[in-house]
Image (cartoon, rainbow, N blue to C red):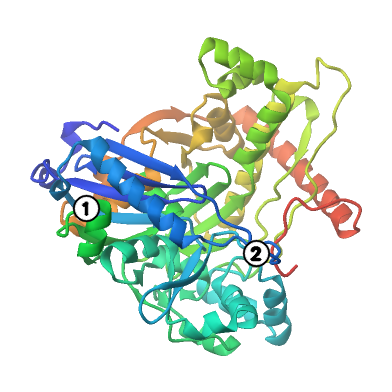
């Protein structure tokens, strides 16, 4: 990512021979990315990893820390080789990771057990807690902004019930990004943005709420120190240096959750700023004061931001990007061949065809992700409704456009829910991720929301956010906010068509009525839900 020299702080120039490493532990892969002090990407190494289903444990997603540590080592070494840098020039590193995933350690700081983000083995434990502690989920949600669906308490309770010998040895817990930093520094610590997703954490005080563990009979002395993002926790150990080729003087700096650090990498660091991250899942986030209470109906998730004094209200749309991939692979073989011949992205071809389809996609109604209902989270059976047997009306282009419109409509519903409890109004949205690369989808998003859509140049927002954190620890930046204001550059803007916004509002209202009807079919056992939270 190139930036204008006029935007660079004078302090950055003092560090122009120094570099920063970001380690991004995502759901599907691990990456080590090296940046210079101007935010330019120097090198990257990426390895795919898999999260294993545990035998005879339904809905499990174990984190294979032994195999994955070797992948981390390989990525770090390869990124240094690719950069042609002397490791001494890497002055600091930090990490970001998928949220909700946890690692448990014994008293010697050796890993005992870990799970990835959407591990949902603890369905029985969720039910047990709700049934035996009346009102507890509502009580904990008010303080933490989280429900039990992907929380750490039910998972640790599962371990206590099913692997008691391992549970007895547990002395500490951390998030997966923290695990990376612990392996490099020997220090187990965490930060608010990632630890907050355990649900055992205070939004207002930005620290652990061990009393929650006490209340449900779980160990309450296993929570490590919580540092603000950008805090130096140590340097690379001799052992880690010998494995990774990192220098022992490289500072190891507290990182954070992928969405929150990704927000910083997009410049979304001030109260009232809004972003939509259009990846496999779509997240709609609004920066709010950390004292803002979550909504009484538990409809929206609230997480600590990486910026001190701020939280983020978050809506989630399930599988938006994955649905597009499914549609491409299931129906678009001809477009794939055409894309290969022209050496362009198949989605570019699909978008060009979809531009010829009128607003509303000829009445096609996609039923996939519901809007956010965090307290009772499940979806209808995947389907397309209101199809026509006229191929001029119902075809790949119209169905493709309907999916794009639907992702934007569900995002808008989530944003409206956030507006309702925060009283924050906004007219501008930062849009990033794979969905922002085309030209049609951003324009539809502008029309549906009635907001100006801004798209940044950065292609590695999450990794850049982690590099910003490392830069704060190294003294290159005074804060994450100043780093964001220095490094983020804008690429494109899209403005809403007021007439289209009014038409999409009618479609949105109709879609909500139809979706409720589809949920009743699931309730009656006539169709199968696309996904439901543990404990329902």
Say whether residue 269 is visible: no
Name above or below for residue 154 compared with residue 351.
below
Circle 2 or circle 1, nearest the eye? 1
Q: Residue furthest top?
A: 341
Observer-nearest of 259 and 67: 67
Name above or below for residue 462 compared with residue 177.
above
User: Residue 507 falls in which quadrant of the image?
Assistant: top right
Observer-nearest of 294 and 456: 456
Residue wearing tag 2: 120
128 displayed left or right of 83: right
Spatial separation of the CA atoms under disc 2 and disc 1: 36 Å
| Rendering coords of residue 199 (x, y %) | 53, 72
User: Residue 10 falls in which quadrant of the image?
Assistant: top left
312 displayed left or right of 228: right
| Rendering coords of residue 51 (x, y %) | 56, 55
Q: Quadrant of the C terminus?
A: bottom right
| Rendering coords of residue 318 (x, y %) | 64, 48
Point 42% across, 67% down: residue = 290
| Rendering coords of residue 235 (x, y %) | 20, 63
Residue wearing tag 1: 246
Point 69% across, 20% down: residue = 333
Say whether residue 138 is visible: yes
Observer-nearest of 326 and 148: 326
SS type, badge 1: loop
Name above or below for residue 267 compared with residue 472.
above
SS type, badge 2: loop
186 displayed left or right of 352: left
First of labels 2, 1 by sequence position: 2
Observer-nearest of 194 and 167: 167
Q: Quadrant of the N terminus?
A: top left
């Amino acid at each position: 990512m190139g930036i204008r020299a006029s935007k660079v702080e004078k302090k950055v120039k003092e560090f122009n021979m120094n570099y920063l490493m970001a380690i991004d532990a995502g759901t599907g892969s691990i990456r080590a990315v090296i940046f210079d002090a101007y935010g330019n990407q120097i090198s990257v190494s990426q390895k795919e990893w898999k999260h294993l289903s545990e035998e005879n444990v339904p809905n499990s997603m174990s984190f294979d820390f032994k195999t994955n540590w070797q992948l981390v080592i390989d990525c770090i070494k390869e990124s240094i080789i690719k950069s042609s840098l002397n490791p001494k020039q890497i002055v600091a590193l930090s990490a970001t990771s998928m949220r909700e995933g946890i690692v448990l350690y014994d008293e010697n700081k050796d890993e005992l057990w870990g799970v990835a983000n959407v591990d949902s083995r603890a369905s029985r434990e969720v039910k047990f807690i709700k049934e035996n502690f009346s009102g507890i989920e509502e009580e904990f949600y008010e303080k933490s902004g989280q429900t039990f669906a992907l929380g750490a308490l039910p998972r640790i309770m599962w371990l206590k019930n099913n692997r008691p010998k391992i549970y007895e040895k547990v002395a500490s817990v951390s998030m997966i990004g923290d695990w990376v930093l612990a392996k490099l520094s020997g220090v187990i610590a965490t930060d608010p943005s990632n630890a907050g997703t355990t649900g055992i954490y205070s939004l207002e005080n930005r620290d652990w709420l061990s009393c929650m563990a006490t209340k449900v009979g779980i160990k309450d002395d296993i929570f490590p120190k919580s540092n603000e993002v950008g805090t130096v926790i140590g340097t690379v150990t001799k052992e880690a240096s010998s494995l990774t080729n990192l220098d022992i003087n490289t500072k190891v700096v507290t990182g954070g959750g992928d969405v929150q650090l990704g927000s910083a990498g997009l410049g979304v660091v001030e109260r009232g700023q809004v972003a939509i991250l259009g990846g496999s899942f779509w997240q709609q986030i609004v920066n709010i004061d950390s004292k803002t209470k979550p909504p009484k109906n538990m409809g929206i998730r609230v997480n600590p931001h990486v910026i001190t004094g701020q939280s983020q209200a978050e809506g989630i749309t399930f599988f938006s990007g994955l649905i597009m991939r499914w549609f491409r692979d299931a129906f678009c073989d001809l477009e794939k061949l055409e894309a290969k011949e022209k050496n362009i992205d198949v989605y570019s071809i699909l978008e060009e065809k979809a531009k010829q389809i009128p607003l509303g996609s000829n009445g096609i109604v996609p039923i996939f992700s519901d809007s956010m209902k965090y307290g009772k989270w499940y979806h209808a059976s995947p389907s397309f409704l209101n199809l026509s047997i006229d191929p001029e009306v119902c075809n790949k282009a119209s169905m493709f456009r309907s999916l794009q419109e639907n992702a934007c409509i569900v995002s808008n519903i989530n944003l409206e829910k956030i507006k309702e409890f925060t009283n924050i109004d906004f007219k501008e949205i930062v849009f990033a991720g794979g969905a922002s690369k085309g030209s049609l989808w951003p324009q539809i998003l502008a029309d549906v929301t009635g907001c100006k859509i801004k798209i940044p140049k950065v292609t590695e927002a999450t990794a850049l956010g982690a590099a910003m954190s490392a830069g704060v620890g190294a003294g290159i930046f005074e804060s994450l906010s100043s780093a964001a204001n220095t490094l983020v550059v804008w690429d494109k803007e899209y403005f809403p068509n007021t007439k289209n916004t009014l038409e999409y509002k009618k479609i949105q209202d109709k879609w909500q009525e139809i979706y409720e009807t589809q949920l009743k079919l699931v309730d009656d056992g006539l169709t199968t839900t696309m996904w439901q939270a543990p404990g329902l």
